[in-house]
Amino acid sequence: MATPILVTGGTGTLGSLLVPHLRDAGRAVRVLTRHARPASDGVEYVACDLLKGDGVDAAVAGTEIIVHLAGGPKGDDIATRNLAEAAKRAGARHLVYVSVTGVEGVPIGWLRSKLASERAVEDSGVPWTTLRPAQFHSLILGVAAKMAKLPVVPAPGALRFQPVDERDVAEHLAGLVLAEPAGLVPDLAGPADHTLPDLVRGYLAAAGKRRPLLPVPMPGKVGRAYRDGLNLAREGAVRGTRTWEDYLADHFRTARPSETATS
C-alpha cells in the first residue's frame, strides 16, 4: 500500500481543494493541523506546530511525499525550514512547496519570507518541486470587498495582477505532487492580466455597488516594482482557465442577500 501524502495547510483554501484530488487518485492523505481530529474518508489528521517544531518528526514519519501549503503572516521561513529538516531526517523522496509569483522582485517582507522558504526547500537535500501561483481569486475578492467599504476607493493603476482560481491551482498542483520532483516549475497565472481598478470595478458591478474610484500613485521601491511588473508571472507561465468574471458570478450567485445589496 502506498504511504500517505502529508499536506500541511490541508484544511485551508488551497489544501481543502487539493486533498480531494489526491483522494480521487487513490492516495491516502495525512493533514497536518494545530489540533488533532478523528480520521475521515481516508484522511488522517495529526497535530503539529511547525513554527515551534513540536511534533514535526511524528507528523512526517511514514510519508514519502510532503506538500507544504501552510503559511502565516510571520515565520514562514522558520516553519518551512523545520519541515524540510524533518523531511530529510525521515527520508522523504518529494517535498512540494507552494510559493507565489513575484517572490524575487517585490521588496515586501512577506515575499522575502516566501523566498527564504523556497531556499530552505532547495537546500534540504530532499528532491523538491516549487510552484509559484499568482494571487488567488478569493484573495483579490477580499481586498476588493474591503476597499469597497470606503466612500471613495483608492485605485493605484500601477498595480497589475494575474489572479488565478484556486480550483485551477489545486488541479495543477495535484499533478505536480503525483509526478517526479521537478525543481522550480513554470509559474501558474490566471487567464488574463488586470489592473487593480479593473478588478475593483468588476467586483463593484457584480456586487451591485457604486463607488467612485480615485487614481493614486504608489510611491517607493514597492511602487516601482509593481510598475515594472515584477509581481507578475515569469515568461512561460501556465495559464488557468477560470476568469475573474466567472469567479465573481459564481460567488455572488451563492452569496447571502446582504452581500449583494446595492449601497
Image: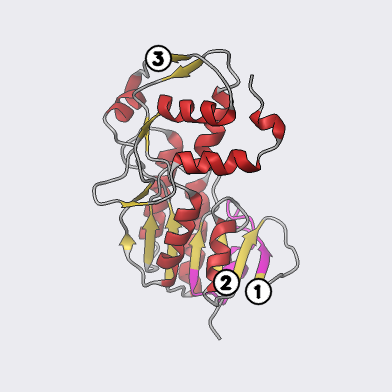
Q: Which of marks 3 and 1 is nearer the N terminus?
A: 1
Q: Is residue 251 above or below residue 8?
A: above
Q: Which of marks 1 and 2 is nearer the N terminus?
A: 2
Nearest the eye: 78 or 211? 211
Q: State the mark number for residue 42.
A: 1
Q: Which residue is drawn at 53% across and 82% down?
A: 2
Disc 1 secondary structure class: loop
Q: In this view, does 146 lie above or below 23?
A: above
Q: Which amino acid does label 3 sit on?
A: Pro
Question: Which quadrant holds the C terminus?
Answer: top right
Quick check: marks 1 and 2 in contact, CB under 8 Å?
yes
Q: In this view, does 131 lie above or below 211?
A: below
Q: Which amino acid does label 1 sit on?
A: Gly
Q: State the mark number for residue 224.
A: none
**Residue 35, percent from left and from top:** 72, 57
Q: Which residue is drawn at 46% across and 75% down?
A: 91
**Horizontal side of residue 27 vs 224, given as left or right:** right
Q: Is residue 4 magenta?
A: no
Q: Label 2, on which residue?
A: 23
**Horizontal side of residue 235 vs 47, given as left or right:** left
Q: How far apart are labels 3 and 1 at the CA level? A: 51 Å
Residue count near mark 3 (Cα–Cα under 10 Å), binned few <14, some 14–19, many ≥20? few
Q: Which of marks 3 and 2 is nearer the N terminus?
A: 2
Q: How far apart are labels 1 and 2 at the CA level? A: 7 Å
Question: Which quadrant holds the N terminus?
Answer: bottom right
Q: In this view, does 157 lie above or below 18?
A: above
Whether residue 238 is visible, yes or no, is yes
Q: Give the range drawn in magenta.
A: 44-65
How many numbered marks appear?
3
**Residue 113, percent from left and from top:** 44, 43
Q: Label 3, on which residue?
A: 215
